[in-house]
Image: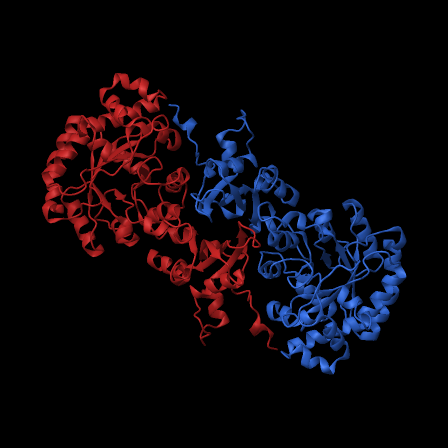
Chain colours: A red, B blue
Amino acid sequence: MHISGSRKYPTEVFLIDESIDPEEFIIATYALYGNPKDYLTLTGALALEQTTGTWVPVAEETPEVRRKHGGKAVSAFEVGIPKKEEGQPRIFVIKIAFPIVNLGYQIPEVLSAVFGNISMGGNLKLLDLQFPKSFTEHFTGPNFGIEGVRKILGVWDRPLVMTMTKPCTGIPPSVVAKLFYESTRGGVDIVKDDELLADPSYCDFKSRLKAVLEVQKKAEEETGEKKLYAINVTDEVNLMIDKARWAVENGVNCIMVNVFATGFSGLRALAEDKKINVPLVAHPCMSGAYYGSPYTGINWSLLFGKFLRLSGADMVVYPSAYGKIPLSREDYLRVAQTLQVPFHNLKPAFPGPAAGTYPGVAPTFINELGIDFMMSAGGAIHGHPMGPAAGGKAMRQAIEVAMQGRNLRDAAKEYKELKAAIELWGIYGEDVVKFELKA
Amino acid sequence: MHISGSRKYPTEVFLIDESIDPEEFIIATYALYGNPKDYLTLTGALALEQTTGTWVPVAEETPEVRRKHGGKAVSAFEVGIPKKEEGQPRIFVIKIAFPIVNLGYQIPEVLSAVFGNISMGGNLKLLDLQFPKSFTEHFTGPNFGIEGVRKILGVWDRPLVMTMTKPCTGIPPSVVAKLFYESTRGGVDIVKDDELLADPSYCDFKSRLKAVLEVQKKAEEETGEKKLYAINVTDEVNLMIDKARWAVENGVNCIMVNVFATGFSGLRALAEDKKINVPLVAHPCMSGAYYGSPYTGINWSLLFGKFLRLSGADMVVYPSAYGKIPLSREDYLRVAQTLQVPFHNLKPAFPGPAAGTYPGVAPTFINELGIDFMMSAGGAIHGHPMGPAAGGKAMRQAIEVAMQGRNLRDAAKEYKELKAAIELWGIYGEDVVKFELKA
């Protein structure tokens, strides 16, 4: 009989998702756009292309090999515009299960499988990955998480305040140190380097750390508060690990990395290195290259929520919906959710919605996120008309007042730093704030 | 502090799907169309509306009650048209997990939860339900399945041939019996009543069975083949069970029901009744009321693939893509898949793509479905120019020739019944067949 050979839908490829042992697979969900001749065949082809198959049959791709190692097409649905309306691509949501036995417990090979060659195949967007516990337990994830960072800082009852030193580039170590001192003196908990300042000749990494350490203790003593300095170790990954170790040996108490520029592996290597026992801050720059299009790339909350927790970020800086980067309110909220909801053995991480954050956003953030987030501001601290110390103070005042449920403008009468900030930038939802790049 | 009370996204509602114990939840996937102010809040609201919540807070909906009994919003993605393009509804794919502890092991309460009030709330389509083994093991599912039906018939190496008696209505028991005899003599394996013929005064159920039984043995003896008569017991559910029991006691060897008209419970009651120990055929009439719109209702493959297996259908008649009902090729294939792929303890069921099936479709069906399906035809058997026996013969000849991989038109030179059928209706993919309702 020639029949079984010609069956288009062998059951070793097509399965109902309930029949998958969830501990043995990573399940990917995609949005697929276009007008395929047959979206079921296409789903099966994608499942095999990313596991055992290629464009022609090969002798050793036996049914047994497909059964054990082949991707499984577990569901396929059409959504959206009815097919009969011409001129629109059809939209499908498909789910493919990838055997973990093919992948090992590493992120690069997961990416290579779930969004490898097929990422180049047309309008296909990776929406989500479901990682079983059998996979995530091979990752340490955030070493500190929300609770661990709060414990270091001794701050339990309010959002944290983070600043990124501004200007981004062009300043020597002494200015970095001065801005650290001023902003922390005012009330900032965590100072992180700007993502654009890594290790330039005029402000090299070692000199910068040395300069900050000289003022860090002073600021802590004066305020009676613990302060974190997140030094930017972004570099070629092998060099980065050595730099981070050196920084920890020399007294740094926090590290940041531009994780989308180094790859998730860079962050994971930092998190799983026993010698690098300080909290890690992940910066979102370059992530837009993945998530920008609705038709291609990788979903925002998967990148930030799941991959950054797998990779070990304790604190995640990312665009808020109320600043200078165009992002929907749901997108910003969804990232905060996915960083904090239960995810097997992986601790929750601090969301730090940023990029145009100012004191007047505090009531909105607190109402939407509770207290487990970081008010993360560069310009609104360092650009405060009364200086960075006042910038830090205004931010702490805004948080205090918002947590009391008081109107910010009324309460600002009692706080001159907050009053100045509100006069300049207003209150989110009450006043219009214009974000313009100043040349 | 007023904060925790005002948090919009409590973690007892929003969870990552990996953190759900899959054995404790039925997970529903929806497509949601529209322009909600905030699709995350909406997802959470849907999860609570269908479990513990109502439109106002009530005293006993404690955090503990929500934790144990509340629906969990496990994922939410936007797909399709970018938000900025005006005039189009946004499209979201959302997933909500429903605690099985709320539901028990019954289909009506599952439907009430996963697509109850919210089915009336706007453009929301239920795409899929994931049922864990802890749920399905409370259902017997198909008692016979593909293997069991083959065993009764003693047919292992080809598709089955089913016919529905035509004309649909208006014929007395003697004509039903005559058509049974003729078509089975020609090669039909299973004769099922038309869905429009249940228990009318002119052809009542008991008289019809009696008349068929008189010719059934004769046909079996003459052909040396076992034949099934699927009597239509569709009625009010309580009456239907008694009728089915009576029919089995009186010698019927197969039963059919218009499952979307009686509800899934009717079919399940037949399947789980120990006295009704014959295979069950499910007919799709009225299912279009659920699946017709891309924006609302319930997905086709969920209705047919999962619900009919849960309910215990051994054989499922449904529209093919090559007949008189407009359905996409993927839709017809997807139903065949979902009826056959692994689904915990539930046996696979026979797909019977129908509604305009004729011998010339055999090569396409066999190429796409293999041999585990039923060639299901009413008009092409009973409307064969040489009569129903020739109609049955032509169908068996088409199957034989197609399985040999021969061209149907060439091979038809050797078979006069097949030749006549092909001259009249052609070959799918080679000739154009017009389906017109004849008045």
* Quadrant where the image shows the N terminus of chain B: top left
Q: Above or below — where is B64 with respect to B212?
A: above
> As rendered, which of A348 and A211 lies closer to the eye?
A211
Snapshot quadrant of residue B149: bottom right
Point out the residue furthest to the bottom here. Answer: B414
Q: Residue at x 31, y 27 (%)?
A: A360
**Horizontal and vertical percent position of residue B385:** 80, 71
Q: Is residue A247 above or below residue B346?
A: above
**Residue B27 visible here:** yes
- Seen from the viewer's position, the closer of residues A350 and B244 is A350
The percent position of residue A130, horizontal first and vertical second, equals: 44, 51
**Viewer-side residue, A197 vs B91:** B91
Q: Is residue B29 above or below residue A214?
A: below
The mark tally for this picture is 0
Query: In the image, is A226 to the left or to the right of A304?
Result: left
Picture quadrant of residue A16: bottom right
Q: Quadrant of the C terminus of chain B?
A: bottom right
Q: Picture coordinates of residue B58 (x, y %)?
A: 54, 25
Q: Identify the residue at image location x=84%, y=73%.
A: B221
Q: Is residue A173 left or right of residue B340?
A: left
Is residue A345 in sight in this rendering? no
Q: Position of residue A61 (x, y in %)?
A: 46, 72
Of A331 and A428, nearer the camera is A428
